[in-house]
């Protein structure tokens, strides 16, 4: 059985119910707003975060509470809103191989659309009727922004730090995955130990997701619309390059400064990219994901049906083995 089937096997009906509920959120009596929402609805991704919410909930209780569906919608809306804002900041013209909101409309409308979507997420989390969820999602929005701010702030540094990299991706990516698992467990009345187990799993799933994203940046993709080396062109050093350059006998200071200052030449970008590819950067990042995967699976609650344990395993494998 492939990973997709394994993941959805225990939550098929719940996921279908969620999709119906989520789609209903993307309409408005205001024609201008409705146009923007319909545009965004056509660009839905794989719903990785809502899937995680549903998997945790269903593994804990057969009849999951209604609040779970609102939580699943809230985390996906936060994710979508943050992507819209990210595209504005990065001046991206595509998202998942399709025209981004800021390119289709303009930066002003894109920022307002992102704000609108985040406001919808707060409405959904309030509908859970759980103050832990309300407080956590409200704080999460700030955490995601802090992660992006920190990433921009390191542009002023001439050194490459793996610890700093993990701090950044914990804030900008893993924190949302952790919220999915932690809050889902809380809504289902999990014990403190179970909540902590799922928090660890969610955090690691998010770390792996971002590491894989960073690996894919080294391979040109028509589906994502991103060329190879896009992160370096934006001044971002990710795990593959950090490892390769930090373990090199060559002095890369000039390249690092130029890339961080956004003044690097195409040749400098190419040299760093080629060195990373040929000197173990990708292999190291893959090895790190495999180590994290083992840690995540070991963190899962010991009392869990095999169907769900297989689903959580397949979820991580899907993240690590994806091509976009």
Image: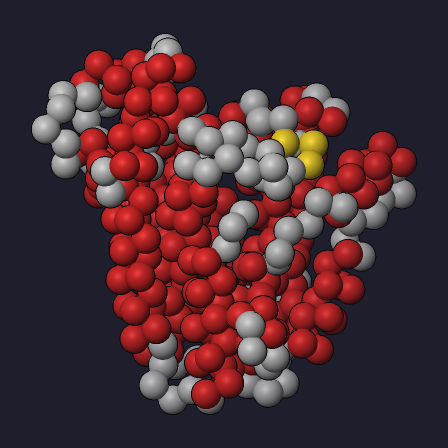
Comparing 272 with 164, the one in front is 272
Name, please, the residue furthest toward the front.
Answer: 278
Image coordinates of residue 230 in percent, x first then y, are: 46, 28
- Taking the image as shown, residue 100 lies to the left or right of residue 138, namely right
Name, please, the residue furthest toward the left.
Answer: 249
- Say above or below: 16 vs 135: below
Q: Residue at x 40, y 41 (%)?
A: 214
Q: Residue at x 58, y 27 (%)?
A: 92
Comparing 147 with 234, the one in front is 234
Image-quadrant location for residue 61: bottom right
Residue 171 visible: no
Image coordinates of residue 157 in percent, x first then y, are: 23, 23
Comparing 101 with 22, the one in front is 101
Q: Residue at x 64, y 51 (%)?
A: 45
- Say above or below: 129 vs 31: below
Residue 243 visible: yes
Specify the quadrant that holds the N terminus: bottom right
Image coordinates of residue 253 in percent, x first then y, are: 18, 18
Image coordinates of residue 269 in percent, x first then y, are: 36, 21
Count up the numbered dots: 0
Image-quadrant location for residue 232: top left
Q: How is the image coloured?
A: secondary structure
Q: Residue at x 63, y 85 (%)?
A: 63
């Amino acid at each position: 059985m492939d990973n997709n089937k394994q993941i959805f096997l225990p939550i098929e009906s719940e996921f279908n119910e969620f999709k119906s509920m989520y789609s209903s959120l993307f309409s408005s009596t205001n024609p201008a707003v409705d146009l923007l929402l319909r545009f965004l609805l056509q660009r839905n991704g794989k719903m990785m975060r809502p899937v995680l919410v549903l998997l945790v909930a269903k593994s804990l209780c057969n009849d999951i509470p209604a609040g779970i569906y609102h939580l699943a919608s809230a985390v996906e809306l936060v994710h979508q809103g943050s992507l819209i804002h990210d595209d504005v900041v990065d001046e991206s013209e595509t998202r998942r191989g399709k025209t981004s909101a800021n390119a289709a409309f303009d930066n002003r409308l894109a920022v307002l659309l992102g704000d609108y979507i985040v406001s919808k997420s707060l409405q959904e989390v309030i509908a859970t009727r759980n103050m832990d969820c309300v407080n956590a999602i409200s704080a999460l929005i700030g955490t995601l922004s802090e992660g992006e701010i920190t990433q921009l702030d390191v542009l002023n540094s001439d050194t490459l730090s793996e610890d700093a990299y993990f701090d950044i991706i914990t804030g900008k990516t893993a924190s949302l995955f952790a919220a999915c698992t932690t809050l889902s467990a809380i809504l289902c009345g999990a014990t403190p130990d179970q909540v902590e187990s799922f928090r660890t799993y969610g955090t690691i799933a998010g770390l792996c997701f971002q590491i894989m994203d960073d690996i894919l940046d080294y391979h040109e993709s028509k589906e994502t619309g991103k060329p190879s080396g896009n992160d370096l062109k934006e001044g971002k050093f990710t795990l593959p390059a950090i490892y390769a350059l930090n373990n090199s006998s060559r002095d890369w200071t000039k390249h690092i400064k130029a890339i961080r200052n956004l003044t690097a030449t195409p040749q400098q970008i190419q040299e760093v990219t080629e060195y990373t590819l040929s000197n173990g950067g990708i292999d190291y990042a893959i090895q790190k994901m495999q180590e994290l995967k083992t840690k995540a699976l070991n963190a899962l609650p010991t009392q869990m049906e095999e169907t769900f344990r297989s689903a959580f395993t397949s979820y991580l494998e899907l993240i690590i083995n994806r091509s976009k």
